[in-house]
Image: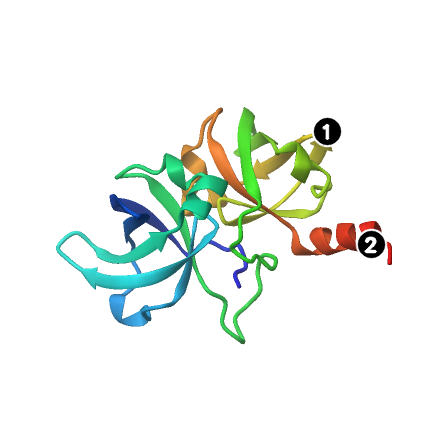
């Protein structure tokens, strides 16, 4: 379980396709603080640490990524050198600064427009049609693992405002129109929709 509050920006150091996809991600987390088998959200995808270490460049951890995860997320777009938002799993007693995020990505949205508004950047996304009904104005979404508030919704498109801090503390300062973004809808919206559909 996560909160969508990014705690580090990692760098994809290596990728190897050997059955599943294996990735090494450089980070600033001390290797001794990472347990093998721990969950770390990488661009919002909950992945399991299978190895860890440190070299002259930086600390790193390895993850194994299933074909299902590659197919349902933007991990297939990763290349060595790519920057990824990182968040370690929520611990009991931690501050819940964002919203409840599972790390199970529902689909991939696309950036369709960007505009400066003062110091902030307004970004417009197009959600997959099947997920659009779960996105509401002033509701929460996790985009590349970042807990964000939806400003407005127009059909399958929705807008989010990025303040300077968010752009500097995450990978959002480097996005562009056409980028594919991991989208996790709000858990509450998922259950409300299910209750509305239920007919015993």
Q: Is residue 187 left or right of residue 24?
A: right
Q: Residue at x 35, y 38 (%)?
A: 78
Q: Is residue 184 left or right of residue 58?
A: right
Please say if 131 is above or below 111. Answer: below
Q: Residue at x 31, y 70 (%)?
A: 33
Q: Secondary structure at mark 1?
A: loop
Q: How many marks?
A: 2
Q: Can you identify the residue that label 2 sits on? A: 198
Q: Which mark is residue 118?
A: none
| Quarter location, residue 47 | bottom left
Q: Residue at x 81, y 49 (%)?
A: 197
| Quarter location, residue 110 | top right
The answer for how far apart the CA atoms under marks 2 and 1 are is: 24 Å
Residue 29 visible in image: yes
Please say if 178 is above or below 140. Answer: above
Q: Earlier in the sequence, mark 2 or mark 1?
A: 1
Mark 2 Cα within 10 Å, few/some/many (few <14, many 20+)?
few
């Amino acid at each position: 379980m996560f909160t969508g509050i990014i705690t580090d920006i990692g760098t994809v150091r290596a990728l190897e396709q050997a059955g599943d996809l294996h990735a090494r991600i450089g980070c600033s987390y001390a290797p001794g603080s990472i347990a093998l088998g721990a969950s770390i959200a990488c661009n919002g995808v909950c992945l399991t640490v299978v190895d860890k270490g440190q070299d002259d460049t930086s600390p790193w951890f390895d993850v194994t990524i299933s074909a299902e995860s590659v197919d349902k997320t933007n991990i297939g777009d990763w290349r060595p050198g790519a920057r990824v938002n990182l968040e370690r799993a929520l611990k009991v007693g931690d501050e819940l600064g964002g919203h409840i995020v599972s790390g199970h990505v529902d689909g991939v949205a696309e950036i369709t427009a960007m505009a400066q508004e003062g110091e902030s950047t307004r970004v417009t996304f197009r959600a997959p049609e099947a997920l659009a009904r779960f996105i509401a104005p002033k509701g929460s979404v996790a985009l590349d693992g970042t807990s964000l508030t939806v400003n407005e919704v127009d059909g399958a498109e929705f807008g989010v405002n990025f303040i300077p801090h968010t752009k500097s503390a995450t990978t959002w300062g480097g996005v562009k129109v056409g980028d594919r973004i991991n989208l996790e809808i709000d858990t509450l919206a998922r259950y409300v929709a299910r209750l509305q559909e239920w007919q015993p």
